Every structure is written in C-alpha cells, then in structure tokens.
Image (spheres, rainbow, N blue to C red):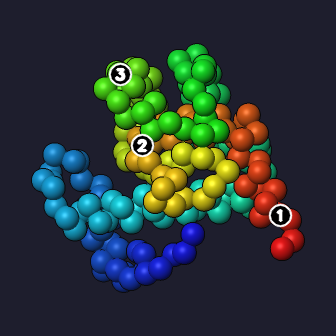
Amino acid sequence: MASGNGIASLGVEGATAAAQALSLPAEAYGNDPQLEVMWAMKAYNHAEIYFNLISSVDPSNLKLTKVDDRIYTSFRESFSDLNIKNLDPDMLKTADAKEKWRPFCNQFDGVVEDFNYGTLLRLDCEKDYTEENTIFATRIQFFAIEIARNREGFNTPVFQAKKQPS
C-alpha cells in the first residue's frame, strides 16, 4: 500500500482539526465532503497499519482487542458457515445480511470502542487492500472476520509471502 500524501499532508493544525471533527457524533454532520475525505483517510490509514502488521508478525499470535475470545466465539456461533477466506459482499451488505449482522454487532456496544465505526475490510484475505478487494464494514465486523482469519490461519499466507526473500 502506498501512503501517498495521507494525513501527513494535513499538517499539525489540520490533523488536530481532523481528530476533533472525527470525535464528534455523526448527528453533528450532514454529508460534508471534507468529512467524508477525513473518514476515508482514517479508514485507509487503519487498513495500511493492519496489513503491515499481519505482514510483519505471525497473525496467529495477534490479539486485536481485549475481548478477542468473546468476539470469535460469538462470531462463529452466528456465522459458522461464512467463507472468511473469500468474502462475498452480499453476505455483509444485503438487507437479509444486515438483519443477521445487526444483533451480532449490537452486542458489542459498550464493549468494543467505536464498534459501529466504518472501516475497510479485504474480500480475499490473501491479497492487499485494493479498490477491487475492499469493502466498507463496521469495526466489529472487521474485528470478527480478521480475528477468525488470524485464528484459522487464513492470514498466514500474507505473513509468509512478506517473510520470503524476493
């Protein structure tokens, strides 16, 4: 993932203003294009950091939250047949899928900070974040799927590929 200008291009004052703006509740904003750009930059930065992490450290040893065990157990009880290696966007985005995900996600309100914030999620876990391989998901969906990918060995090829000399 190339960093480009990213958040660093905002400078100290711009980054401070962005941080303050991002801490306000969603109801405080309409569809402000500048805010959407800040959210996209924050989500991209998170994705870049996470991909670098699983590329550098054996993902099976990662702990993403204080409640990884609870998230994983609940996720696999609710979504035992979900193909996490190659996600089908419809399994997250259709009306039926959203109905199934809602109770799962809401149980982490007050447990996982910012559980319903938007983040980027890779569809094919063996590939990097690209426009074709990325979907927008909630933070708890990201944690649930990535914790499962890490524990079930699906993110290991990313780590192994970066470990091998070119």
User: Is 147 rendered above or below residue 25?
Assistant: above
Q: Please state which amino acid type lies under the numbered disc 1.
A: Lys
Which label lies toward us, 3 or 1? 3
Please, what secondary structure does the residue beneath circle 2 have?
strand
Q: Residue at x 76, y 39 (%)?
A: 153
Q: In which quarter of the image is residue 103?
A: top left
Q: Is 124 in front, or is 116? A: 124
- Give the image quarter of residue 61: top right
| Residue 42 x/y as whole percent | 40, 62
Residue 119, position in %: x, y?
A: 43, 50
Real-space Cα separation, disc 2 to disc 3, in angstroms: 15 Å
Please, what secondary structure does the residue beneath circle 1 have?
helix
- Within 10 Å of disc 1 (Cα), the crowding (few <14, some 14-19, many 20+) is few
In the image, residue 147 above or below residue 157: above
Closer-to-camera residue (18/35):
35
Q: Earlier in the sequence, mark 2 or mark 1?
A: 2
Does residue 158 appear left or right of residue 15 in this picture? right
- Residue at 58 percent across and 16 percent down: it is 77
Q: Distance between the residues labelled 3 and 1?
A: 40 Å
Q: Residue 163 carries which label?
A: 1
The residue singled out by tag 2 in the image is 137
| Position of the C terminus by quadrant | bottom right
Looking at marks 3 and 1 on the same chain, the residue that comes earlier in the sequence is marked by 3
Look at mark 3 in the image and give the residue it sits on. 96
Q: Tally the numbered discs.
A: 3
Q: Which of 23 and 123 is in front in this view?
A: 123
Residue drawn at the location 42% of the way across and 33% of the way down:
90
Q: Where is residue 123 in the image (x, y as percent from the top left)?
A: 54, 45
Question: Crowdedness of circle 3 by 10 Å Cα count: few (<14), some, many (20+)?
Answer: few
Which residue occupies the extreme top position in the image? 77
Q: Can residue 140 be seen in this view?
A: no
Q: Which amino acid does label 2 sit on?
A: Ala
